[in-house]
Amino acid sequence: MEKVKSFFKKIIDYLKGNPIVVILTVVSLVVGLTVENFFSFNNFNNLASNTGVRFLIALGISGCLIIKGTDLSAGRIVGIAACITAVLVQRADYASKMYPQIPEMNMWLVLVIVLIIGSLIGLINGLIIAVLNVPPFIATLGTQTIVYGIALIFTNSQPVGGYQKVFSETLSAKLLPIGKYPGIPVYVLFAIVFGLIFAFLYKKTTYGKYMYAIGGNEIAAEVSGVNTKKSKILIFTLAGFMYAFAGYLLAAKSGGANAGLGQGYELEAIAGCTIGGVSTTGGIGTVSGILIGVLVFELLKVVLQFLGVNPYFNFIVQGLVIVTAVAIDIRKYVARK
């Protein structure tokens, strides 16, 4: 009985501390009950797919936020990973093949290549921040621009398509179909797996312990023996890995790629993390909270779409949500002090 009370108390405390989650959830329910086809299998799967990919990006950026940093290069790393994936999985007989001299490659080999490249970019971010002591905002802003330029050159600023059939079919697969329900998108499976991995990393390993220590008080962490430079490098390297994996999936989900793919995804990821309780002041954040934040933010976009709101107006609403979430986070930080 005590465990049940404790469980519900945690839920109530979380909702009290995250009013945006409550408001957006209530709005979504109202829209769902009043707008036709909101609660449909197709809409559910679209929401699940989008949430799954965005969740992977948010997991990557969460570590950067928890140590009082940020990563503005996330969206561009997603984009270049998608472009590299698209080029390497093009069919050999595709008329508009970007690089005819490159033979058809196994999709899993392509994944390894993309993950290595993403991790290397993350490693560079980490080295610039930890070794050269460049503020994360400036370092990743520079990387963002550089990576975007490389993506434009690599694709000649042209869209890339014409995938191998096995690549498209494998990553568009559905799991556990029941009756009229076509099944869960495979992106959701990846999100669940990495969510569990990150929950373990954050709660049960020295990686997570050091990460929270740095975010709480970096000087105190150093005094207690934490190698803060190494930890920061690892955090940004893992972030690059996650962005690259998300880019690989996004290339399949979109059916094509271009250098602009992923633009602004870093802001959505930061918004999802902040809505979900990751503090921009450092030292606080959970994987479950991140998932809730990303889901609620994606739900907001679906609600606006079903309400027929001008697509351009969506950006204004999303921006207001981001600013409000950060403002609430800062107020909670001041209250704790």
Image: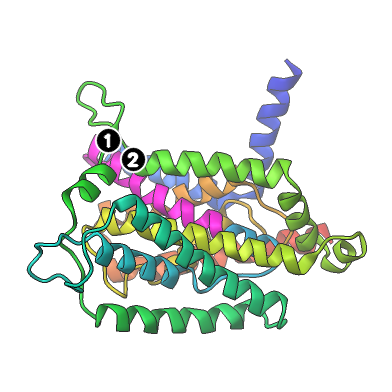
Residue at horizontal 66 percent and vertical 52 percent from the top = 285
The quadrant of the rendering that contains the C terminus is bottom right
For the residues labelled 2 and 1, the Cα–Cα distance comes to: 6 Å
Location of residue 223 in the rendering, given as x and y in whole percent from the top left corner: 92, 65
User: From which residue to which does the magenta span run?
Assistant: 35-61
The tag on residue 139 is none
Q: At 39% from the left edge and 45% from the top edge, which residue is drawn?
A: 28
Image position, residue 51 (x, y; %):
40, 49
| Placement of 120 over or under 1, stated as above or below | below
Relative to residue 65, is residue 314 drawn left or right? left
Q: Quadrant of the N terminus?
A: top right
Circle nearer the N terminus (2, 1):
1
Question: Where is mark 2, residue-wise?
Answer: 186
Residue under circle 1?
Answer: 174
Look at the picture and state if 292 lies above or below 282: above
Q: Main secondary structure of the magenta part?
A: helix
Describe residue 257's horizontal placement relative to residue 269 as left or right. Answer: left
Which amino acid type is marked by label 2? Val
